């Protein structure tokens, strides 16, 4: 319940879980080669991660061409849908990512390891009692009239704007090649390291209705 939903019986357990998440983040960042082991304040974690780094680097290199099933399904759909407007081979999701597979990881990554605020050209984030407050530079309370939907699939709702498929293909290509400053994890701010990585999140309902012939 704590790792999946963040439900905890008391504050002391929540504090310990937050510290555990920090150790996990440091471990993964070191193993991925995104930060130096010396940046980790926990020497036990740093030494364990450093010992695993070289072995796992080779493992990642060998598995670089492997795509998880969910990634393959998304890529196959995009390639099929955009086959008439884009080079299908150029449509690929990020390969190596920092997986958000525990409750609270995104929250911890959203702020510096040694601070309570983070700011760049697009957002200002501040730690608050119950999480993180994000203030984007352009904050609209509605997507009416600005939410664009690519043509070629289901009917586009009246409150949205339809755009040609090639527009979406160009937007997807740009999104998969972001500038370096947007790739830097806020957690790594102030750690004197590269700290650039994609993050990924797979959402699967805990309660799923029975569908004949569906996945279990």
Image (spheres, rainbow, N blue to C red):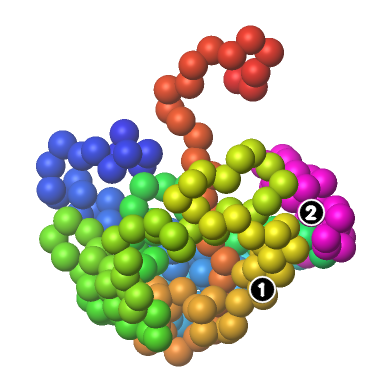
Q: What stretch is highlighted in magenta?
A: 61-89
Label 2, label 1: how far apart the Cα atoms are: 15 Å
**Dot 1 lies on which element?**
helix
Give residue 184's mark. Answer: none
Q: Position of residue 42 (x, y in %)?
A: 36, 70
The answer to whether residue 123 of the structure is visible from this angle is no
Give residue 174's mark. Answer: 1
Q: Judge whether 29 appears above or below 85 on screen.
A: below
**Dot 2 lies on which element?**
loop
Q: Residues within 10 Å of mark 2 (few under 14, many from 20)?
A: some
Name the one closer to the observer, 3 or 124.
Answer: 124
Q: Which residue extends farthest bottom?
A: 192
Report the side of 211 relative to 64 (left or right): left
Return the disc, 2 or 1, that comes first in the chain's sequence: 2
Q: Judge whether 73 appears above or below 189 on screen.
A: above
> Which residue lies at the image location 66% right of the left edge and 73% below the top edge?
174
Label 2 or label 1, whichever lies nearer to me, is 2
């Amino acid at each position: 319940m704590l790792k999946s939903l963040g439900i905890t019986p008391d504050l002391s357990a929540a504090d310990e879980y937050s510290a555990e998440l920090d150790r996990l983040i440091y471990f993964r960042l070191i193993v991925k080669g995104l930060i130096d082991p010396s940046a980790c304040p926990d020497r036990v974690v740093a030494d364990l991660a450093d010992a695993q780094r070289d072995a796992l680097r080779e493992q990642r290199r060998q598995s670089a061409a492997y795509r998880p099933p969910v990634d393959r399904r998304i890529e196959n759909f995009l390639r099929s849908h955009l086959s008439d407007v884009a080079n299908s081979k150029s449509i690929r999701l990020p390969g190596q990512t920092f997986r958000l597979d525990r409750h609270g990881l995104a929250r911890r990554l959203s702020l510096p390891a040694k601070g309570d605020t983070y700011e760049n050209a697009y957002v200002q984030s501040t730690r608050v009692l119950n999480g993180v407050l994000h203030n984007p530079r352009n904050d609209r309370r509605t997507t009416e009239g600005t939410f664009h939907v690519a043509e070629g699939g289901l009917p586009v709702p009246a409150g949205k704007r339809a755009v040609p498929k090639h527009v979406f293909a160009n937007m997807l290509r740009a999104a998969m090649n972001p500038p370096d400053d947007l790739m830097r994890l806020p957690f790594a701010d102030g750690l004197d390291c590269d700290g650039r990585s994609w993050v990924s999140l797979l959402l699967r309902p805990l309660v799923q209705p029975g569908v004949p012939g569906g996945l279990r």
